[in-house]
């Protein structure tokens, strides 16, 4: 290595050390990082040095909200001891409220502690807890019904999460947006599916909820498949969910998801409801049979073949693999024998 190269190398190392030091010495980053990691003593050290317990900037949320989301009761107590505001985010659009966070994350001790400290209750918390009288009062006070708190959830999301039909009905009757989307692109219908509230799924769809709305987890149908909830899958299909929907390259087709998970009953229901057995997942370029072969799901592969899956379909990517090649890569010998018995060929470039 020449002297100039050595100098540049040492200079780059020095710059990285300086940047690392600046990040660690930044009071916001330091207390945020310590809180995230549950490092009580570093949080205490920051507070003893005069760091504001409610310090926040830009996209950062206050330490007490981080600690509550993680369930770090001792850190929460320490922050409160140093004057942290337990009511922050209560009336702030896109704000994070500690009491609401404790309730959402089901940290009952923290929730009880906040209530004992007389934390103020907003419409979001009242909706989550199903307090019809309080929600009615907030509506009469003209509280905005589509305001967002804690990861972008509205009162309707939270009432749905809690399974409170009367509150959901009240909010809808007073103008709550049935298809309002959170930061994770989830609607109230996603919440109803996630928490297995069948009655609310029907109510929301009857009130205009889009069965094919695509969030980060996919559509409500994708979510039901992810949760391995056969009855919910049936309900959504009956309500018009598209069994072949793939609105973007990253949206997994429902049958592909079932094949990956090996959920035979759901896959058969999808196939009987019109799912394309040879549908390609646009992002990876493979079919449900490729996925079943890769995972070694023998019964799933048998089902797909029975419904007409192409045993020699090649992936729509540079490797151009057949299902048999996928099984070979995965080391699934029984799967290989099954595919060969149906005329499968070992073709592909993957290793």
Image (cartoon, rainbow, N blue to C red):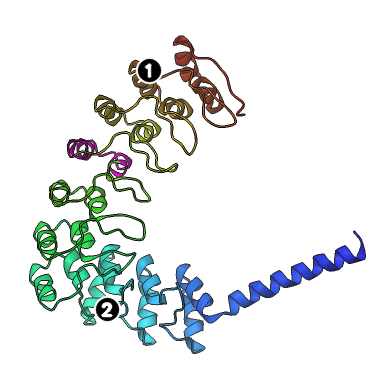
User: Which residue is disc 1 drawn over?
Assistant: 305
Label 1: few (<14), some or many (≥20) within 10 Å? some
Q: Nearer the viewer, residue 288 or 112?
A: 288
Q: Give the range drawn in magenta.
A: 222-239
Q: For the image shown, how many numbered marks are present on the structure?
A: 2
Left or right of 162 on screen, residue 82: right
Marks 1 and 2, the one that precedes in the sequence:
2
Q: Nearer the viewer, residue 304 or 227?
A: 304
Task: Based on the picture, tell me whether residue 228 belongs to the magenta stretch.
Answer: yes
Lateral position of residue 227 relative to residue 9, left or right: left
Alpha carbon of mark 1 to alpha carbon of mark 2: how far? 56 Å
Is 52 on the left or on the right of 276, as rendered?
right
Q: Observer-nearest residue: 12 or 333?
A: 12
Label 2 environment density (alpha carbons within 10 Å; few <14, some 14–19, many ≥20): some
Is 223 within the magenta? yes
> Is 183 placed left or right of 59 in the picture?
left
Q: Are marks 1 and 2 in contact (CB under 8 Å)?
A: no
Residue found 10% across the figure and 59% down from its top: 169
What residue appears at the point 27 percent right and 77 percent down from the top-left corner? 90
Give the residue at the far right of this rendering. Answer: 2
User: Where residue 174 appears, x then y in whole percent?
Assistant: 11, 66
Considering depth in this image, is 315 or 128 the residue closer to the camera? Answer: 315
Q: Is residue 227 above or below residue 164?
A: above
Using the image, determine if residue 91 lies above or below residue 184.
below
Quadrant of the snapshot with the C terminus = top right
Which residue position is annotated with label 2? 91
Residue 264's x, y, as percent? Answer: 31, 27
Chief secondary structure of the magenta span? helix
Q: Classify residue 262 by image quadrant.
A: top left
Q: Is mark 1 on a helix, strand or loop?
A: helix
SS at mark 2 in the image = loop
Residue 151, given in percent of the width and then of the height, sits at: 34, 64
């Amino acid at each position: 290595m020449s002297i100039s190269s050595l100098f540049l190398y040492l200079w780059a190392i020095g710059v990285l050390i300086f940047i690392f030091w600046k990040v660690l010495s930044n009071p916001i980053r330091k207390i945020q990082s310590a809180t995230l990691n549950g490092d009580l003593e570093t949080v205490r050290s920051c507070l003893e040095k005069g760091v504001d317990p409610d310090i926040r900037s830009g996209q950062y949320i206050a330490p007490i909200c981080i600690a509550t989301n993680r369930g770090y009761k001792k850190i929460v107590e320490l922050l409160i001891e140093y004057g942290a505001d337990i009511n922050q985010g209560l009336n702030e659009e896109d704000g994070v409220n500690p009491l609401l966070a404790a309730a959402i994350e089901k940290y009952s001790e923290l929730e009880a502690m906040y209530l004992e400290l007389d934390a103020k209750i907003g419409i979001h918390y009242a909706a989550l807890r199903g307090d019809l009288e309080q929600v009615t009062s907030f509506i009469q006070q003209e509280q905005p019904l589509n305001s967002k708190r804690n990861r972008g959830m509205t009162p309707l999301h939270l009432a749905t999460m809690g399974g409170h039909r009367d509150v959901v009905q009240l909010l809808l009757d007073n103008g709550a947006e049935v298809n309002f989307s959170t930061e994770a692109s989830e609607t109230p219908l996603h919440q109803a599916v996630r928490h297995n509230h069948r009655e609310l799924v029907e109510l929301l769809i009857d009130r205009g909820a889009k069965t094919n709305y695509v969030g980060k987890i996919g559509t409500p149908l994708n979510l039901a498949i992810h949760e391995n909830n056969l009855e919910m899958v049936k309900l959504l299909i009956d309500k018009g969910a598209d069994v072949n929907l793939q609105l973007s390259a990253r949206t997994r087709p429902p049958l592909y998801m079932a094949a990956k998970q090996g959920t035979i009953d759901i896959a058969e229901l999808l196939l009987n409801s019109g799912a394309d057995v040879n549908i390609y997942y646009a992002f990876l370029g493979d079919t449900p049979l490729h996925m079943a072969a890769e995972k070694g799901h023998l019964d799933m592969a048998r089902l797909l073949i029975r419904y007409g899956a192409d045993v020699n379909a090649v992936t729509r990517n540079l490797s151009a693999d057949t299902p048999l090649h996928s099984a070979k890569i995965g080391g699934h010998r029984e799967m290989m024998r099954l595919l060969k018995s149906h005329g499968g060929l070992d073709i592909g470039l993957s290793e």
